[in-house]
Image (tube, rainbow, N blue to C red):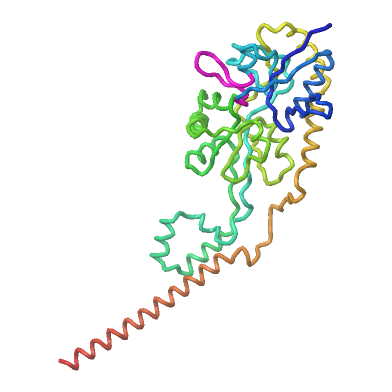
Amino acid sequence: MHFGKWIVAALNTSKMFEVQVNENGKKRIAGIEGKFADAIFTKMNIEYDIVFPEDNEFGHEINGGNWTGVVGMVQRGEADLGIATLGINENRFRVVDFSFPYTTDRLTFAVLKPSEWLTGFGFFNLLDLPTWILLFGSFLLSSALFFAMLKATPSKAAIIKNFRELSKAVERGTHRVYTGKGTFAVPFFLNSKELYFRLLGNEIERNNWYMQSEEMVKNPLKSTDTILVAPSEILKFLFGNQPRIFISEDSSYTISTAIVIRKDFCCKTQLRKVMSRVVSAGIYERYFNLESFRYSLSLPGNEIKRDEERILTLNHLYGAFSMLLAGLVVSFLVFVGEVISHKLCVCSTRATQKHS
């Protein structure tokens, strides 16, 4: 059966859906979803063109029921299909149709683990500045304080493990949460019954904590205060082999992913039938595992997994002993000052008595 040429909207994202041009000028698609889509189109003997949205978004609803991104192009008839790891939900179903789902995933988050141990002067993080000032002023850095400090230092840094803890961290202002522009994450957060989800959604919206799709796959976790919210499969694909990245087991919702189809598209039934067979044959999982393996090989070889327990060395106590020494020096100077002050007072008293 001849179906004619299809127009496919997508996001040109590394490792997910890449458009490559060979020496003859012919385009081919690569990446997990790219190869999966090509397998379907090849099976159906389809010719296709790839188009990209100008805003480079997955697609979210704006005023008047219009949509941006990939979903918007399919809604307006600028494309027949849309492929961009798009989840099936009620809002999108009002303007587009969906193919047979090719995967089901849950929304979670990933964070760069803090250093396993707070070393050197890291024990300052245990208390805030006013508390330290009160302690130093009250006890003059007494030895009892430093023995207590040595017991608590070094200390293992806490890792945020679920969305409730994440919400508290964002509320305190210690962390920032990023997600893809046009994904279902923020609408879900904003409409959730749980207060901590709504807080996350409001903070993301207020601070415009969004990432483009290409930015999300290129090392978005550059510091320990940055957290990425995304489907768990994507996070495992990007960070599964990096021991310094923690991927939470907590999840907010589970959603199926499918190809977006124009409402009046002619070949929905045939596409769904072929996709059902391809998905049942495990083709999507095959491409996912293959790309994951290739990506893991491309990572730097200097990722060394640290043991959970480490030997306590003098370097870990350097900061504490330095401050202890500084406290002793300050105490000695105060003592010398008191002695000198006392001598001056005695001399002054004697001089006054002689004049009398």
Residues 62 and 246: in front is 62
Quadrant housing residue 91: top right
Residue drawn at x 52%, y 36% is 167
Q: Write the start and end of the magenta stretch as one range.
A: 55-70
Q: Position of residue 44 (x, y in %)?
A: 82, 13
Dominant secondary structure, magenta: loop
| Residue 177, magenta (yes or no) | no
Residue drawn at x 84%, y 13% is 45
Q: Position of residue 57 (x, y in %)?
A: 61, 25
Q: Position of residue 319 (x, y in %)?
A: 56, 65
Quadrant housing residue 352: bottom left
Above or below for 344 versus 122: below
Residue drawn at x 79%, y 23% is 36
Considering the image in quadrants, where does the C terminus appear? bottom left
Looking at this rendering, what residue extends furthest in the front direction? 24
Left or right, residue 272 beside residue 330? right
Above or below for 260 versus 115: above
Considering the image in quadrants, where does the N terminus appear? top right
Looking at this rendering, what residue extends furthest in the bottom direction? 354
Quadrant housing residue 12: top right
Residue drawn at x 65%, y 8% is 263
Q: Position of residue 128 (x, y in %)?
A: 45, 54
Left or right, residue 170 beside residue 258? left
Left or right, residue 258 beside residue 186? right
